[in-house]
């Protein structure tokens, strides 16, 4: 069974037309945005130039909240496919565009919906909480969606006797288990970017910068999180670096977030936590598929568009809305 992501890819491909190098892309994108009453939502992992042209930059929770309330006719999602799907589920009457349809997610891919449906059958009395980094089909199989900003609070909002399946991220799941003391049944999925950090190289950096704070995203492995001074979502990490008094931070998440950290605290130093390979950074290859050129073509041709079957939208809406309600109640 193909997911909507695979069907989108098969059906539409994407507009990869060469762009005239003389064009002022920022000016053109702003002009097209006005003309089409479009809004650009960008995740913190996007390239700096895309973040700088966006109307709203945020983490997965903030982006879903924004997608749910926007008055624009067209949403250009500078992020990955599951994020654009979430925007479509929350605003089905709007056109949702993704600059590159191939911008997928290794974590989402690690949980095929047909296998998860079989897994779920083994635990008929469990409630299903899924991390937003998954396909629309997986959300449709869930009771509540969560993000890394609210996963702990969502689990805590449920009665202690409630049995829970948590998927697809085993690392976020293990972190939530630890924080809440609850016994969650975990799906064995992971993100390729957050499982690549080298403990040894992080330790070396901490020796070199003894006053630096080490901050990490909960998609990282437990042994990395155990040594962190702060663990949180991208927006949580950003806030931490603004409010904390240290002058240096070693940052264990996708390196795109450093653009906002540096903008908010220009006098501080931010070092991307090194991966266990020869590469010096930790870019998400999916997030980085979007470019300013593709963003321009996407607005110009209003393609590629992310679409979903009505039946999937209806089923996936409930667990996302449940998350947004709990988050609003808790002021998240
Ligand atoms: P947040 O933006 O919710 O922290 O999630 C990070 C991520 O991996 C998105 O793909
Ligand atoms: Fe998916 Fe990981 Fe990239 Fe986030 S950083 S989009 S979880 S592959």
Image (cartoon, rainbow, N blue to C red):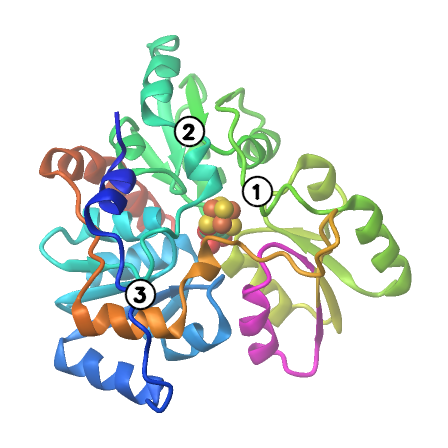
- x, y percentage for residue 37? 14, 75
Q: Dot 3: within a 10 Å radius of its alpha carbon, few (fewer than 14), some, or many (20 or more) residues?
A: few
- The answer, for residue 148, to whether it is visible in the render is no
CA–CA distance between discs 1 and 3?
26 Å
Tell me which label, 2 or 1, sits earlier in the chain.
Answer: 2
Q: Read off the residue under disc 3.
A: 16
Tell me which label, 3 or 2, sits earlier in the chain.
Answer: 3
Question: At 26% across and 65% down in the image, what residue appears?
Answer: 76
> Where on the picture, by quarter, is residue 273?
bottom right
Query: Does 154 sit above or below residue 49?
Result: above
Determine whether the residue tagged by mark 2 lies in a helix, strand or loop.
loop
- Foreground tag (3 vs 2): 3
Q: Which mark is residue 111?
A: 2
45 left or right of 305 in image: right
**Considering the image in quadrants, where does the N terminus appear?**
top left
Q: Which mark is residue 176?
A: none
215 left or right of 97 in image: right
- x, y percentage for residue 270? 69, 69
Tell me which label, 1 or 3, sits earlier in the chain.
Answer: 3
Q: Read off the residue under disc 1.
A: 192
Q: Is label 1's Cβ within 8 Å of ligand 2? A: yes
CA–CA distance between discs 2 and 1?
13 Å
CA–CA distance between discs 3 and 2?
29 Å
Query: Does 33 sit above or below residue 278?
Result: below
235 left or right of 142 in image: right
- The answer, for residue 41, to whether it is visible in the render is yes
Bounds of the magenta segment: 251-270
- x, y percentage for residue 211? 84, 65
In front of the other: 184 or 252: 252
228 magenta-colored: no
Q: Dot 1: within a 10 Å radius of its alpha carbon, few (fewer than 14), some, or many (20 or more) residues?
A: some
> Where on the picture, by quarter, is residue 137?
top left
């Amino acid at each position: 069974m193909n997911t909507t992501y695979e069907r989108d890819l098969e059906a539409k491909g994407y507009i990869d037309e060469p762009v005239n190098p003389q064009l002022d892309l920022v000016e053109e994108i702003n002009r097209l945005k006005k003309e089409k009453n479009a809004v650009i939502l960008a995740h913190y992992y996007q390239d700096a130039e895309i973040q700088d042209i966006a109307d709203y930059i945020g983490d997965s929770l903030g982006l879903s909240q924004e997608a749910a309330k926007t008055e624009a006719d067209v949403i250009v999602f500078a992020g990955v496919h599951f994020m654009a799907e979430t925007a479509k589920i929350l605003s089905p009457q709007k056109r949702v565009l993704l600059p590159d349809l191939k911008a997928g997610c290794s974590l989402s891919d690690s949980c095929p919906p047909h296998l998860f449906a079989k897994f779920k059958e083994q635990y008929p009395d469990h409630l299903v909480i899924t991390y937003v980094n998954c396909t629309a089909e997986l959300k449709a199989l869930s009771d509540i969606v969560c993000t890394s900003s609210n996963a702990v609070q969502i689990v805590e909002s449920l009665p202690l006797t409630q049995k829970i399946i948590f998927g697809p991220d085993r690392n976020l799941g293990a972190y939530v288990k630890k924080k809440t003391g609850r016994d969650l049944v975990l799906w064995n999925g992971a993100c390729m970017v957050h499982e690549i950090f080298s403990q040894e190289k992080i330790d070396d950096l901490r020796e070199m910068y003894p006053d630096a704070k080490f901050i990490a995203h909960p998609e990282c492995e437990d042994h990395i999180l155990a040594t962190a001074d702060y663990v949180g979502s991208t927006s949580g990490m950003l806030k931490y670096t603004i409010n904390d008094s240290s002058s240096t931070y070693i940052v264990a998440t996708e390196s795109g977030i450093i653009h906002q950290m540096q903008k908010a605290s220009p006098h501080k130093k931010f070092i991307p936590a090194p991966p266990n390979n020869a590469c010096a950074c930790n870019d998400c290859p999916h997030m980085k598929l979007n470019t300013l050129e593709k963003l321009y073509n996407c607005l110009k041709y209003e393609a590629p568009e992310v679409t979903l079957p009505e039946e999937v939208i209806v089923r996936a809406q409930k667990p996302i809305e449940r998350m947004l309600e709990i988050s609003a109640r808790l002021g998240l």
